Amino acid sequence: MRIDLHTHTRASDGTQTAEELVRAAAEQGIDVLGVTDHDTTDAWAAAARTAEEVGITLVRGMEISTRHRGRGAHLLAYLADPTYPPLVTHLRKILDGRSSRVPAMLERLRAVGVAVDIADVRRAADGTAATGRPHVADALVALGVVPDRSTAFRRYLNPGRPAYVDRYAAPLVEMIRIVGEAGGVTVLAHPWGRHGPDCMPETAITELAGLGLAGLEVDHQDHTPADRERLRAIAQGLGLVVTGSSDHHGLGKHDHELGCNTTAPDQLERLLALAETASQLSGRSTPEVIG
Ligand code: AMP
Ligand code: ZN
Ligand code: FE
Ligand code: FE
């Protein structure tokens, strides 16, 4: 059984439609797929239709852009009621913050002699609710300024680079609570991916576990083998669910092929049992697991 619980579509910054993603997953022998776009559930309906059609199991989720201890942290939220008003409010604020800074990024690019029009970004972001740096990067690729997204981030868009502009992110602790109230479960995405262990030490993870965090995404391409072993031990010590995922973005990220990391069946079972309990306690109408 192959279980991949973290993937993106064009609804955020993947390059495949939900239908293309789910079909590709089925073709590649994935049995259980989590669709987790950044801060939006826009892909859910098409993903659900296609999952029923091709006969794979779909776990509907999202990856919420949060902040913790002054740094960005990505929070995977599974099976939450997407109409829960506090969740809706935060997601709207994140999406607004992400796209409203695009003109400022283009201004900064102009200042270093790179001319990108807002129309170029809009074209790159066609169909997404979450226009942001990846689409500015795509516009730079389309204009031939850089060969690929990663180079665009490295040269222009990462913190400390000329076109970086900060944006709103929701407080991590508050989002763990809100997702729980919405009947869902939370897994910390690539906890040591971007900044290494320093920003999310064991003490911080312990605190989050006490506040309702359900799991850690241990097996992720951004983690070294040594990181994975340490994170696995931390998760086991705290009784957290251990997940593994591709964080697939279609052609938008190299070396994140579907199924390159997977979640063990017993861990998925634990996660779904926790989601069931959260759903019942919340009294909200939460999405079913399809398939
Ligand atoms: P934003 O929300 O606009 O700040 O964009 C952040 C998103 O860009 C992240 O969630 C990633 O999916 C993507 N991203 C960040 N760094 C890179 C990179 N080096 N290459 C490709 N995509 C990246
Ligand atoms: Zn992404
Ligand atoms: Fe992420
Ligand atoms: Fe992701």
Image (cartoon, helix red, strand yellow):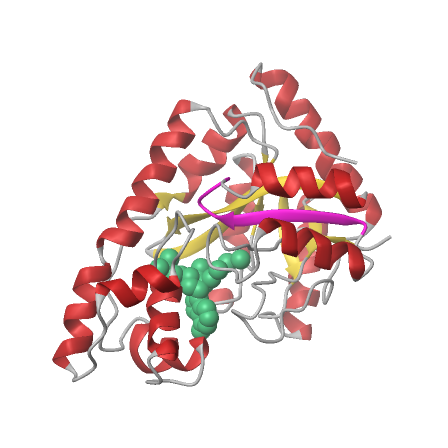
Q: Please say if 110 is above or below 232.
A: below
Q: Quadrant of ligand 1?
A: bottom left
Tally of numbered tags? 0
- The one nearer the camera, 105 or 267, is 105
Q: Please say if 51 is above or below 252.
A: above
Indicate whether residue 32 is drawn in magenta: yes
- The one nearer the camera, 112 or 271, is 112
Q: Which is the main secondary structure of the residues drawn in magenta? A: strand
Q: Is residue 168 left or right of residue 75?
A: left
Q: Please say if 140 is above or below 28.
A: below
Q: Position of residue 92 (x, y in %)?
A: 34, 38
Q: Which residues are magenta?
A: 31-41
Q: Going 38% across and 39% down the picture, which residue do you hit?
A: 91
Q: Residue furthest top?
A: 283
For the question of whether residue 214 can be seen, the reply is no
For the question of whether residue 95 can be seen, the reply is yes
Q: Going 59% across and 36% down the picture, which residue do you hit?
A: 45
Q: Going 71% across and 41% down the picture, which residue do you hit?
A: 58
Q: Going 38% across and 77% down the picture, which residue do you hit?
A: 142
Q: Quadrant of residue 146?
A: bottom left
- The one nearer the camera, 251 or 232, is 251
Indicate whether residue 189 is drawn in magenta: no
Q: Quadrant of residue 124?
A: bottom left
- The one nearer the camera, 33 or 164, is 33
Q: Position of residue 68 (x, y in %)?
A: 39, 50
Q: Position of residue 83 (x, y in %)?
A: 46, 25
